[in-house]
Amino acid sequence: MAEHPYLLGHGEREWSRLEEQHRLWRDTLFEPLRRLGIGPGMRVLEVGCGNGVLLADLARLVGRHGRAWGVERDPLAAEAARQRVEKMPQAVVLQGDLFGKLPGPADAVVARWVFSFLGRPAEAVRHLAAALRPDGLLVIQDYDHDGLRLHPRKPAVDRVIEAFRAAYRARGGDLWIGLKLPGHFARAGLELELVEPAVKAGPPGSAPFRWVERFLFEHIDTVVSDGHLAPADRVAFERAWREAAEDPATLLVTPIQLTLAARRRRVGAGPGGAG
């Protein structure tokens, strides 16, 4: 069964947005990675690496004696990733699907904002777990979308947020996948080791505000064309957002980002550790 077409698309504008997104959330992923012991000399696999903005930082984390693989389905994004890491001999970009043959075994497999698009998360967890060495870690950062809100509330903005959620669902995605990952880990034989939430907030003009603003405005065309939002509701949203952006009382709170890590047990190991 093929996955649905990628909702956000690929191209220079989207890659620029992803770079801004990476700068905003980078530390919420890399601080847990370091605490988990991921570092120089290790072998790390990123699935859904896009244009390589995270992969390049993973390559720096493992250093020249390590290995950072990136797997990306879209050929244009894969080529952009190759160009980004071309001077990093430890980084390798492979064009392919995360459900296909993967390199490894890896000390860690990383997926950031990938599972919220997948229609087969349980299968994906099992497949990625198989790419881990014994005691290797599957690290996923993704959404619990309930946190997203604008205060004072604007009904026109709320309608657009719900339309985006519907667009994800219609393409097989799940913006609450972060909450469901512990169950998928357990059924795949992985042992949950870390759950860490992160949320950001700010007034108009702040980095969190700009992140949400850019996402909504740059992808609203797709939501309208897919039939999840009426053109009149789009006009009302744009007016309401402008009002919010000019109001010093406005505060935006981002969706919750959940970073979860689960360990592949050694053969014969029980829940308490190696046997």
Image: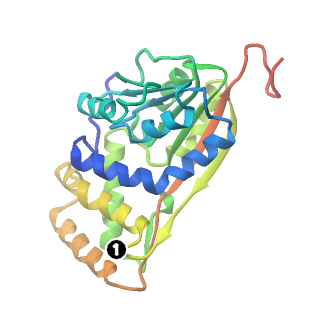
Asked if residue 66 lies left or right of residue 204, the reply is: right
Indicate whether 84 appears above or below 89: below
Name the foreground residue: 145 vs 60.
Answer: 60
Indicate whether 128 appears above or below 149: above
The answer to whether residue 165 of the structure is visible from this angle is no
Within 10 Å of disc 1 (Cα), the crowding (few <14, some 14-19, many 20+) is: few
Name the foreground residue: 15 vs 238.
Answer: 15
Q: Position of residue 65 (x, y in %)?
A: 56, 24
Asked if residue 179 lies left or right of residue 271, the reply is: left
Q: Within the image, what quadrant is residue 118 found in?
A: top left
Mark 1: which amino acid? Pro
Indicate whether 30 appears above or below 205: above
Q: Position of residue 206 (x, y in %)?
A: 41, 71
Q: Quadrant of the N terminus?
A: top left
Q: Which residue is mark 1?
A: 155
The answer to whether residue 18 of the structure is visible from this angle is yes
Asked if residue 239 lies left or right of residue 251, the reply is: left
Name the foreground residue: 89 vs 168.
Answer: 89
Most extreme residue toward the bottom, as rendered?
A: 248
Q: Position of residue 203 (x, y in %)?
A: 43, 76
Q: Quadrant of the C terminus?
A: top right
Q: How many marks?
A: 1
Q: Residue at x 25, y 27 (%)?
A: 75
Q: Residue at x 30, y 32 (%)?
A: 83
Disc 1, SS = helix
Q: Position of residue 22 (x, y in %)?
A: 42, 50
Name the foreground residue: 95 vs 34.
Answer: 34
